Amino acid sequence: MRLGAALLFASLAAAACADDMPEFRLTFRDGAIVPLETRVPANRRFKLVLVNEGGSPVEFESTELRKEKVVAPKVTTSLVIRRLDAGEHVFFDDFHPGAPQARIVAEDAGQ
Amino acid sequence: VSKELFQIFFVVLRESMEALFVVSMLNACIGRMPRGDRAYARWSLWTGVAAGIALSAAIAYALMSVSELLDGDGLDYFQCGMMLAAALMMLQTAFWIGRRALPRVLGEPEKGAAVTVGVLCALAVAREGGETAVFMYGVLLAADKAINLSALIAAAMAFLTSVALFALVQLSSRAIARALFFRICEFVFFVIAGSLLLGAIDRLIALGLVPTLSPPLWDTSRILDDHGWIGGLVSSLTGYRSRPELIVLLVLGLYWSAIIGLLRVRSHQPATR
């Protein structure tokens, strides 16, 4: 997991040179969110790809991330996050209240 | 099955709460206004609701289609514009209702106010209506089932509850003094408008156009989590945040100072016209 994160950050650095945003994939399936924890670089622009694999609509929502987006069943869409302070940021599927919340953990990329 | 039913019932009711407040309170206020105001405003209100439903369908279509229209930044700009417009219309309407609550102010009908009421209702219905339509379409015609019976029952229950709440507001408007009822509605509209304003600022922050000015200053999510069942509803109606940054406090502080200032000015004006 740690190694994976390290490799990911290495690839992020490479991506930054190409002036590309790193992308992170979040899969929704009728209330379940995979992965429940996503590590992203702090203070950097990145993209969240939202995939709804379930049969019911979902709504990505977070007051901390200040985003709210409906995703119809079997649809893939994306969100761009401008920047995040280092730390944990919770989001959840607003169309499945009571289902477990998930986290985005922003980390300083070892300066 | 019953958990799913309750979830659907709760989501539909929560999404329609703001529109429900706006339409039921406005309709009740208009019913107790002088005849001149009533004629224009009632027509405008229900035309606005109809327009809002049509707009909801268009938004739902845009959200479900593969088009990039409401993708990425476009969605944030769109949500921001809708919330700012709704907040402005809500404020104007609140002040109008407040003016009409004053004794002996039964002058000329305000046609402009009636137009604002219509636009406000259209925005209130359309803002969450599009998302609710996507939600209902999705759960009713869930991909792997034919027609989801529990979703149908939940939707019917939510609709009946809305009708009951609407009727309750109409009845209570008759049960209490007119001026008091108008004051209550005015206050509720100020609260919702503040929440909409904060929502619009949130979008601007997400777009990188406004800074948060600080990290979260405190965390009350243990008492009332704005991501929770109840907290989410409170947050969407009042602008409550369990982890507010400085910008949130500034926006709400300035907003309420301005409202109180404007109300002071009005209370010192002689009640003519």
Image: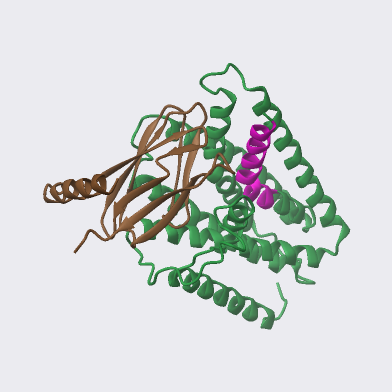
Chain colours: A brown, B green
Residues in magenta, as a range: B2-23
Position of B96 with respect to B138 (left or right) is right
Does residue B249 lie above or below A26 as drawn?
below
Does residue B151 lie above or below B245 as drawn?
above
| Most distant residue in the right direction | B175
The residue shown at (22%, 46%) is: A8
The residue shown at (68%, 66%) is: B187
The residue shown at (65%, 60%) is: B110
The C terminus of chain B lies in quadrant: bottom right
Q: Tell me if residue B272 can be seen.
A: yes
Q: Nearer the viewer, residue B227 or B207?
A: B227
Does residue B129 lie above or below B232 as drawn?
above
Q: Position of residue B99 (x, y in %)?
A: 69, 68
Q: Nearer the viewer, residue B260 or B231?
A: B231
| Most distant residue in the top direction | B146
The total number of labels drawn is 0
Position of A18 with respect to B83 (left or right) is left
Q: Position of residue B76 (x, y in %)?
A: 39, 50
Position of B221 with respect to B170 (left or right) is left
The N terminus of chain B lies in quadrant: top right
Residue B11 colored magenta?
yes
Q: Position of residue B185 (x, y in %)?
A: 71, 61
